[in-house]
Amino acid sequence: MSAPLIELHDCAVHFGATPALAPLSLRLQRGECVVLVGANGSGKTTLLRLLHGQLASRLTQGRRRAAPGPMRGEVAQAMVYQRPFLLRVSVWRNLMLALWLAGVPRAQRDARSREALQRAGLLAQRGQDAHALSVGQQQRLALARAWAVRPQLLLLDEPTANLDPAATREVEVLLRDFAADGVTVVLSTHNLGQARRLAQRVLCLDAGQVVADLLVQRFFDGPLPAAAARFVQGELP
Amino acid sequence: MGSFGDVLASALQLLAGADARLLGIVALSLAVSGAACAAAALIGIPAGGLLATVRFRGRRGVLLLLHTLLALPSVVVGLSVYLLLSRAGPLGAWGILFTPGAMVIAQTLLVLPLVAALTRQLVADAMHGNAEQLRSMGASPLQLAALLLLHERAALATVLLTAFGRAVSEVGAVMIVGGNIDGVTRVMTTTIALETSKGDLPLALGLGLVLLGVVACINLVIALLRGGARRRLAFGPAA
């Protein structure tokens, strides 16, 4: 097996005195599409933030190890939030500013913005105020913005939670498209249908613990540990 | 002294006739306060932004001082600048006391805490729920402040207009460091004070009306900016 893109070794996270993630170990391979499922407060967002490297100061034990850094003009990871923050400027400027923040050379920004908007189906809206887009379009813009910086790892925190089925499907198409480029994707969702459609591997969290870490087929077809089975059957207490 | 109606009629006559003396005073007022606000913005906006996005030892003390300076009386600012710029003062060699330059310095010091404190609050409010996302995209503290100010630029304009309103309507500081010299450092507020004491009420009232007009214009601009922001929200994200 090749060297993992990210490896968490016995990592535990606390927010003050409150434990958010029990000690867990996890290896993410390049090109994987991993879906995190679990109830509200089970630790999905915390795990995504930990993978992103945002919680170094909250680690009470363990370590996070990432593969050697990306090349210039690329980033190690990008994250798309459930309610993405878009600047109150045009769609185009949102892309250009993201590329500026990521340190992408000026000469490449124009072409990369155009390509990302094209893939997200938003090129025609490039001159519009980003806040004038529909919620689904805003989420696609957030995805395009994340993809434009060429991340090795794309983290998504319930990216379709606020979307109707048609907009959800559009986002999923875009995600499959990005994954086909070899981007490693980790996505959290409450939508088990979406997990089945997108995942190669499913992690189920319960009260800050990973209670199942299985290939997608085994997760949905095979026997599950009790806590994961309760979640799948909608029998959470 | 005539009745209020007579005085008002004379004042309106002065305004309608575009009296050259009156226009000169108005122009100097706007120039001095505009320059002071520009200087305060140049220093206060980055300082306020960084105070919101950077954590450092002594930050609470700096914020306490900044908020205290919001209540700084303009005469105290005028006196401090006077002492600095007077011949015996540390900056006496500049020789700018009783010039518009001294008035700009005094008004800059007067509105700088206002600009910095309101900018800090603006950025701090905008950070809620958004800062993590921008940081995750690689934003440094300075970039974070700059982007949030770009995002909240209508509110930032309100801050600057508020500062301009404060500068153009103050009298104590410019009176002390400007000396109210006719044709040189006489601005609207100092003229109103002087002409009232001399009994030339039409000019005083005329200038008072202009000052009110300037403040009304500022309020109108603020209302338009806010209205624009509200419209964007109302017609913005459709489901």
Image: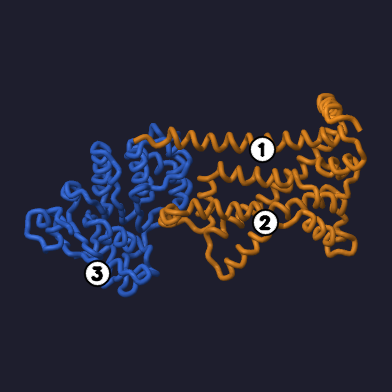
Chain colours: A blue, B orange
For marks 2 and 1, the one nearer the N-term is 2
Q: Which residue is mark 1?
A: B218
Q: Secondary structure at mark 3?
A: strand
Q: Which mark is residue A24?
A: 3
Q: Which residue is mark 2?
A: B70
Considering every residue shown, the one lying at the far left of the view is A222
Residue type, label 3: Leu
Q: Which mark is residue B97?
A: none
- Tell which subunit mark 1 falls on: B
Q: Secondary structure at mark 2?
A: loop
Q: Out of A71 and B102, give the one closest to the viewer.
A: B102
Rendering quarter of residue A66: bottom left
x, y percentage for residue A6? 29, 64
Q: How many marks?
A: 3
- Is the N terminus of chain A in the top left, top right, bottom left or bottom right quadrant? bottom left
Residue type, label 2: Leu
Q: Residue at x 83, y 30 (%)?
A: B4
x, y percentage for residue B227? 54, 34
Report whether B216 appears left or right of A64: right
